[in-house]
Image (spheres, coloured by chain):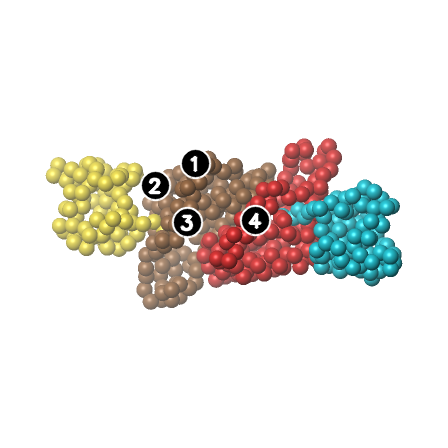
Chain colours: A cyan, B red, C brown, D yellow
């Protein structure tokens, strides 16, 4: 099972900070995974696709689409606001 | 010295300890950010700060590495709160010791700009009339961009 | 809050009191300048600071008035030592509270630049190999001049 | 008697931070007063005339030459070095 992490406002929209999801061979990339989420939850899908949102796979920021597997930790990062 | 603190900390005590640790520094600049009691949306009752454990520390370490490469400074101190904070509580303390004041001022300013726009923290303001996630303002991004141009000359 | 101190003061304690006094400020920037233990001329054994009683306070008040007119800040804190100081002792503490961090950073930076070049203090370094009056370096005057250009736009 | 104040390195050169001096009708301006000091102490005179030195009469900075009387406090101010 892949571990999904939703930070900031995305956690509110997802209704939780974490979610486990089975990533099968069909869901081979980040964008397919986001489409799969959007199919079940339109509001969350739209929020994840917002251009201000960044993605990290296994704690490393990824630029654009990238391969994902069932062992990955996938984080959805809205604009940060520290300090 | 980077610390993500899940409990309240004492900025004055931490700063004093830091100042002692950099005995040779002639100058120490510090920044303290606190939860404000008011905001456009009315009285603030609390601030909730989320982070990405592990990754947040890495983004902070990267900012510190950049600052120490760029200015002649001692290892900076950064303490950043997470969790639920009450008005008046310290959110962030940054302190930078240096032999010369301009290095200390610029590095502290730089660290704050990048903490605002790069470090993995998310902030929700709980107000009397509701709650709102805070995102950097355009001015915060502009502040951070101030350092781009001069990057090669320092 | 301007003070010329003839005895050692506790920067951490003073800063804590100041931070409490400006409860609504979201940001507090501080600068602490200490007697360095070394210098180009060898180990520093002491620093002697002279001032012009009455006039020094007036020159400091003028600098503070200019800063408060220019930035949206709380009344700043400035404590400046005079007399004989040992290495490691605090010379000057400047603290500025503000709603927004850029105002606090810039005002503190400005206050220090003008304290260096305008306030009536004279500093003599007692070194192992002799003594020397310190005068502002060209860079100090240049630092102070940074603020001239923007004077009308803020 | 006018009260003269020598700050910073000027105090070392004058051999004291303060000095009382009778300012008669002949010594009607600051530059005449400095010449009178120089006549007695060449090194101090030169130091007081250095262009980096500013003057204050009765706690107010004065630009260039100015009238002085026997009741005045006259301060000689080398470049400051606070902070």
Q: Which residue is mark 4?
A: B145
Eye-nearest disc, 1 or 4:
4
Gap in angstroms between the C-alphas marked 1 and 2: 27 Å
Residue C55's label in the rendered image is 2
| Between discs 2 and 3, the one toward the N terminus | 2
Callout 3 and callout 4 share a chain: no
Q: Are the residues at dot 1 and dot 3 in contact (C-beta closer than 8 Å)? A: no
Gap in angstroms between the C-alphas marked 3 and 4: 22 Å
Residue C143's label in the rendered image is 3
Residue A33 x/y as whole percent: 82, 53
Callout 2 and callout 3 share a chain: yes
Which of these two is toward me, D32 or B139? B139
Residue C152 x/y as whole percent: 43, 36
Q: Which residue is mark 1?
A: C152
Can residue C101 be seen here? The reply is: yes
Gap in angstroms between the C-alphas marked 1 and 3: 18 Å
For label 1, count other residues whose C-alpha is less than 10 Å away and answer few (under 14), some (14-19) or many (20+): few
Is residue D2 placed above or below D38 in the rendered structure? above
Which of these two is toward me, B45 or C145? C145
Q: Element at badge 3?
A: helix
For label 4, count other residues whose C-alpha is less than 10 Å away and answer few (under 14), some (14-19) or many (20+): some
Q: Are the residues at dot 1 and dot 2 in contact (C-beta closer than 8 Å)? A: no
Residue drawn at point x = 62 percent, y = 44 percent: B34
Q: Chain of mark 3?
A: C
Residue drawn at point x = 52 percent, y = 41 percent: C103
């Amino acid at each position: 099972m892949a571990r999904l992490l939703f930070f900031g406002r995305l956690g509110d929209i997802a209704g939780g900070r974490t979610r486990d999801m089975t990533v099968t061979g069909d869901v081979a990339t980040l964008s397919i995974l986001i489409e799969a989420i959007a199919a079940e939850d339109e509001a969350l899908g739209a929020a994840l696709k917002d251009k201000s949102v960044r993605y990290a796979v296994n704690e490393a920021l990824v630029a654009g689409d990238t391969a994902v597997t069932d062992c990955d930790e996938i984080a959805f990062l809205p604009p940060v606001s520290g300090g | 010295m980077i610390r993500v603190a899940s409990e309240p900390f004492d900025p004055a005590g931490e700063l004093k300890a830091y100042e002692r640790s950099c005995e040779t520094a002639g100058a120490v600049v510090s920044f303290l950010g606190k939860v404000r009691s008011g905001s456009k949306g009315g009285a603030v009752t609390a601030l909730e700060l989320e982070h990405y454990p592990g990754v947040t520390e890495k983004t902070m370490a990267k900012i510190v590495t950049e600052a120490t490469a760029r200015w002649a400074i001692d290892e900076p101190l950064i303490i950043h709160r997470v969790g639920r904070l009450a008005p008046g509580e310290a959110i962030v303390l940054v302190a930078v010791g240096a032999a010369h004041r301009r290095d200390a001022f610029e590095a502290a300013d730089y660290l704050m700009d990048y903490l605002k726009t790069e470090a993995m923290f998310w902030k929700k303001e709980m107000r009397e009339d509701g709650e709102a996630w805070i995102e950097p303002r355009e001015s915060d991004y502009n502040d951070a961009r101030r350092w781009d141009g001069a990057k090669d000359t320092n």
